Amino acid sequence: MDDEKKAHSELGLPNPYLNSLDGDFLYHLGYSSLEARNGFTKDGVSHSFQDVKFVVMGGSSGRMRSFAEVIAREINHPVQTAEQLDIHRTDRYAFYKIGPVLSVSHGMGVPSITILLHEITKLLSYAGAKDAVLIRIGTSGGIGVPPGTVVITDKTFNGFLKEEHELVVLGERKVRPAVIDQELARAIQSSQSDARFQTVLGGTMCTDDFFEGQPLNLTPIDCNISQGRVDGAVCEHSDEQKMDFLRRAHSCGVVNIEMECTAMSSLCRLTGYKCAAVCVALLDRLKGDQVKIQEEEYKSFGMRPQSLVASFIKSRLSS
Ligand SMILES: O=P(O)(O)O[C@H]1O[C@H](CO)[C@@H](O)[C@H]1O
Ligand SMILES: O=c1cc[nH]c(=O)[nH]1
């Protein structure tokens, strides 16, 4: 094995160029590789990232603030307020550390979550926390499931209904497998302690837009309308085409649609981290496009993935 490969395998990430960096500054998180390795201080208290076992991520900063407090209570962490658990250094992503759990926002869509995933997997690898598990807690549009159902993803599909993540690198199309850990998905489902809501294991389709479809113009429109809403500012497909596509997706095993899962599953597969997606369905897309949910119901639905993932983490930490 040559030197470059040897050093690469020591860090465990598939990028040999990382070995030639003097130090790596994780620009969107505001932390450096040195702090990841040696720890950091906040309010005079030293912390380490080496003990991180779970990284829980979700689109909004408010949700991740709430999850920081939920998990702090659940695991009896000595510090329980979000203000004291907050370790954010930049205003890109909310960032909380609750003992072995990081609670981090990822923004909306693939470009935002992939930036976070590159930096957070480097942070974990520099810190020596290679066994950490990454879990996305989100909202989604259901297909053929009642609103409020919590979907634990067992397959991730792109807008072409393939278990792949596509990206354009150096002017060329790159296709990566987007597969997710089955055992982890089942373990999360079986850790449910609150019986007041339904969970299902099922396929999740990831799209690059909430309204229309993918920006890539690679196949005819009828193969590629993704979320396919007819209530955006622009719509170039018919309601019938949308319904045909949603039914086709459902027949392939898709039970919900969101905007990050294939990027997460493909990047985690490459970096060697296990990941899962746990998303509540806000509506059934076979019945409409508008998310008309009332605020109270939105809040209570949003707590469901938090409660399930908190139970899972608690059971893993006590086993
Ligand atoms: O609730 P979050 O985690 O933001 O996830 C879903 O909600 C956003 C769209 O409303 C997209 O990011 C989608 O994936
Ligand atoms: O329909 C929906 C609801 C939430 N998030 C999505 O991406 N789609």
Image (cartoon, grey):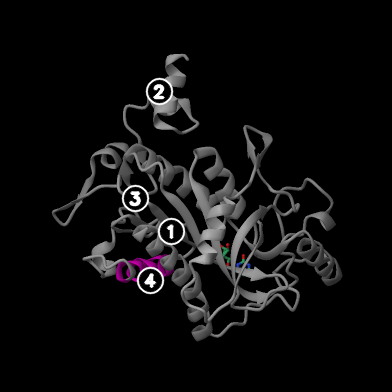
Q: Give the residue at mark 3.
A: 52
What secondary structure predominates along the stretch shown in magenta? helix
Q: Residues within 10 Å of mark 1 (few under 14, many from 20)?
A: many
Q: Amino acid under label 2? A: Ala
Q: Nearer the viewer, residue 112 or 303?
A: 303
Disc 3 secondary structure class? loop
Secondary structure beneath label 2: helix
Residue 47, position as x, y percentages in the image = 22, 50
Res. 108 visible in picture: no
Q: CA distance from mark 3 to mark 2?
A: 23 Å
Q: Is 62 left or right of 235, judged from the image as shown? A: left
Label pair 4/3, CB-CB below 8 angstroms = no
Foreground mark, 4 or 2, reads 2
**Residue 62 among magenta residues:** yes
Question: Residue 220, percent across and down?
Answer: 84, 51
Residue corresponding to mark 4: 66
- Looking at the image, residue 168 lies above or below residue 292: above
Give the extent of the magenta segment: 61-73
Residue indicated by mark 2: 7
User: Which callout, 4 or 2, points at the residue further toward the start of the chain?
Assistant: 2
Badge 4: how crowded within 10 Å, few (<14), some, or many (20+)?
A: some
Q: Secondary structure at mark 1?
A: strand
Q: CA distance from mark 4 to mark 3?
A: 19 Å
